[in-house]
Amino acid sequence: MLGDSLPLFFPVLIFGLVLWLIPTKVDQYCNRLSPKGARNGKIIYRALPIIMTLYLVIYRARSIMDRDMTETEVAKRLGQTEASLTDLQLLFTGDGLGEIALLFLLSFSLWTRYLPSLKGSSNELKGMISNRVMIYVAACALLSFWVFFPESNYYSTDSLPLEPTMSAAGDYNLLMVIIGILIIAFSGELFAISTFHYSDAGIKTLQFRASMKMYVVCAIMLLGFYSSEFFTIDWVIDNQFDKVKMALIFLSQGLVLTFICGPSQQFDDALKVGEGRSRSFAIMATCAILIIVVITSLLVRSSTVFDQGNRYLHEAFWLTASVMILISMTQILPRYGFDAAARPEYWWLRMMLVFAPAVILIFNSLAIFLIPSLWIVACCSIILPSTIERDVKSPNLQQSILLFGVIVVLSAGLILSANPVSNFLLFGPIMLILSYGLMKLHVSKTN
């Protein structure tokens, strides 16, 4: 298999993705070379992951069509049957899912400089957008590499079945796979937008169009999740569904970027200088801890594994501690120059709400239980500053109370439902939408 014949292949691929996390630094290093060397260096490190991923896709496609019985997927799904072009759907619905998704997303990252929304923008801005989409895609790829590129797919095993033991059509719906890929791609655009802290016509157009696309693909993903067998899964008992968990985490990232991180630039700019910012963030941190502990505890306890005794509290406290450690680590960064945002402490908080579940899932399979509480914290992160700080007009009191009541009632109803985690994932986005709507209306009236 590929991992045995080319043992350095995946370490080199991971190294190439790591370079994508720091494109500006790598470009600066390349600029020290001669003009030709700088140009070639930039092309090579950008193209390397794409070429390697393309090789993975071609290698898997050939194995499927040639019925290479030394390959795990061929042995388990196809056996010695007659080859057909329809078998290539496994590139999307089988073990090749991660490879084809990564190939598309890497290619999309470089193509973003040619987005129609940026047609009138400067080449410098186009390059910055492309670099930041690269960062997001590389981060998602590295955080989910262990899920979509497990060693069992690329290294020889002691024994393989003589007859197929798994579905030849794959495990996942083709439409949902495509929608999941699009969610990550459009999320990358919104992530790039959230890193800019000045106005530009191209950025505004890109944000509008990316948000519209996210409304559609996220709605389709939620409907697909509701109609699938995964909606009723007990996420603790069925730990083999890591790909489904990661897909839901990517959905969560997209929703937070769409309704919280993307528009937060406009919301933060409306807060002016910010008298009482320290008090505001201290209250925000306190609320975050309480919300994550309470909501996560109740959701973990709803699982059949933790419905007896107090072990659910132990797990909930560990999950909360993991999130707060990540948030605390990023709060140091503004002191070292990472403070371009209007309110860098809130910007880094929101970024951790985006990425924390994916990071924690590497170490703890219960990370999926964090998503509902992080959504509520994300709502608070755009409302509390304008409510607590003293030199800014607060949102309408009646509307804020109504939103708070909706969040409390909806959360209570979902937690008490028969399938709380899945129901929260399905209906929880309502909270994000309402919070975004309240702040959008408030800012429009203020300005």
Image: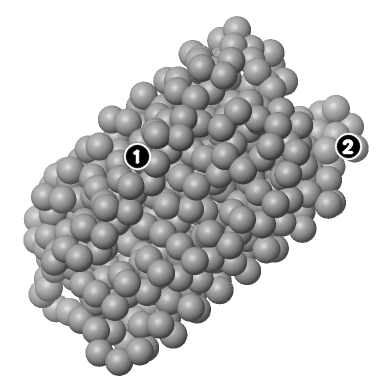
In which quarter of the view is residue 202 placed? top right
Residue 208 in percent (x, y) is at 45, 20
In which quarter of the view is residue 174 placed? top left
SS at badge 1: helix
- Tell me what residue is drawn at x 25 percent, y 43 percent: 221
* Dot 2 crowding, Cα within 10 Å, few <14, some 14–19, many 20+: few
Residue 434 shows in the view: yes
* Dot 1 crowding, Cα within 10 Å, few <14, some 14–19, many 20+: few
The dot on residue 33 is 2
SS at badge 2: loop
- From the viewer's perspective, is residue 266 above or below residue 143? above
Residue 311 in percent (x, y) is at 37, 88
User: What quarter of the picture does the N terminus occupy?
Assistant: bottom left
Residue 84 in percent (x, y) is at 13, 47
Extreme residue in the front direction = 398
- Tell me what residue is drawn at x 73 percent, y 44 percent: 276
The dot on residue 23 is none
Residue 40 in percent (x, y) is at 74, 34
